[in-house]
Every structure is written in structure tokens, then in C-alpha cells.
């Protein structure tokens, strides 16, 4: 029996011998259910909005790290909506905090110090609260040193404008 050429299946899979080419098993094996895609898009959009709000709050509240939250926003919007992703790339927030980093140019010293300051504050609080947990303190210290090495050793420092 020859493969059946239908608009849904002719490019992606040959028809199963003796099976109806438009049966639910044949169609579902070719593409995921649209309802599932819609749910995932909604989840990505919700996560992106949450990260955007928290990152924006982090501009004035040093306990929230702005740059990682904006990177998460960028990722979530890219997964959820091309239109929101494009909008976010055009915002002043993105251009000020992430554009140079994403383009692999580097970061301003002020941005690096802001990130390290936030990380140090958060990890310092956790370090104090883990007074009786030696392994937790060691892990926090290693991660903190890793941040310092990464930001000051691998990320290029851009001159101030």
C-alpha cells in the first residue's frame, strides 16, 4: 500500500498500513495537542510576568536580584509569546540591565556591584540563619565565591557612560 498524502501527514509521517490516515492515533503521533500547547504558553507567560514584576521591584529593593529575574523574563516570554518577547527587548529596563550582557559585550561595574551586593546580602542572611548547619554554610560560601569569580573574572567590565 502506498503512503497517503494528506495536508496533515504527507511531510511528517507515512500512513500506517490499514489505518485511517486521519485517525486520532495518527494525528496525535504527528503533533502535540493544541490544548497542551496553550496551557504551556499560558504558564510561560504567567512566569514571565511574575519575573518581570519581581525584577522591577528588585530595582529599588536590593534583596531581589534584578538581572537574573529579567533574564528569566526574557526566557519565559520567548517561550510563551513572540509579541511579548519583542516588546520586552524594546523596553528601557532590558536595555539598561541586560542588553550589553546578552550581546556578550559585558556589564557596567555598577551593575556588577548591584548583583554581587544583592547576592551577598541574601546569602549573608542565609549564612547567619544556618549557624548550626555546617554543610549549608560551606555550600553558600562556595556559591558566593563562584559568583565573585564569574562576575569579576569572566564578565567583561564596560566603561561608564
Image: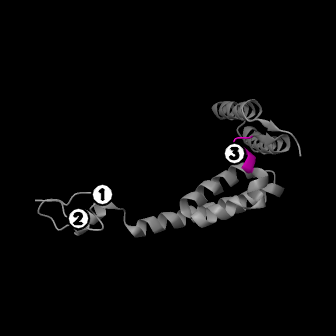
Foreground of the two, 150 or 21: 21
Q: Residue furthest right?
A: 161
On the picture, is 101 further left or further right than 44? right
Look at the numbered disc 1 and give the secondary structure of its residue: loop
Q: Are marks 2 and 3 in contact (CB under 8 Å)?
A: no
The residue tagged 3 is 103
Instruction: Say left or right for 120 vs 39.
Output: right
Query: Residues under labels 2 and 3: Cα distance?
Result: 44 Å
| Image quadrant in which you'd find residue 3 | bottom left
Look at the image and give the residue range highlighted in magenta: 98-105
Q: Earlier in the sequence, mark 3 or mark 1?
A: 1
Mark 1, Cα crowd under 10 Å, few <14 / some 14-19 / many 20+, is few
- How far apart in space, not on screen, are marks 3 and 1 (Cα)? 36 Å
What residue is pinned by disc 2?
5
How many numbered circles are shown? Answer: 3
Residue occupied by mark 1: 12
**Residue depicted at 72% across the width and 61% down the height:** 90
Horizontal and vertical percent position of residue 158: 82, 39
- Report the colour scheme: one colour
Amino acid at each position: 500500500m502506498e503512503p497517503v498524502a494528506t495536508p496533515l501527514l504527507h511531510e511528517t509521517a507515512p500512513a500506517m498500513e490499514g489505518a485511517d490516515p486521519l485517525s486520532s492515533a495518527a494525528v496525535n503521533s504527528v503533533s502535540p495537542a493544541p490544548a497542551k500547547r496553550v496551557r504551556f504558553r499560558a504558564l510561560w507567560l504567567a512566569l514571565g510576568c511574575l519575573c518581570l514584576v519581581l525584577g522591577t521591584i528588585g530595582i529599588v529593593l536590593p534583596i531581589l536580584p534584578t538581572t537574573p529575574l529579567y533574564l528569566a523574563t526574557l526566557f519565559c516570554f520567548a517561550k510563551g509569546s513572540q509579541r511579548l518577547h519583542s516588546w520586552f527587548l524594546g523596553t528601557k529596563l532590558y536595555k539598561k540591565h541586560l542588553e550589553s550582557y546578552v550581546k556578550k559585550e559585558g556589564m557596567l561595574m555598577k551593575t556588577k556591584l548591584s548583583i554581587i551586593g544583592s547576592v551577598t546580602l541574601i546569602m549573608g542572611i542565609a549564612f547567619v540563619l544556618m549557624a548550626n548547619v555546617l554543610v549549608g554554610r560551606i555550600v553558600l560560601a562556595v556559591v558566593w565565591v563562584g559568583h565573585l569569580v564569574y562576575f569579576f573574572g569572566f564578565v567583561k567590565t564596560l566603561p561608564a557612560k
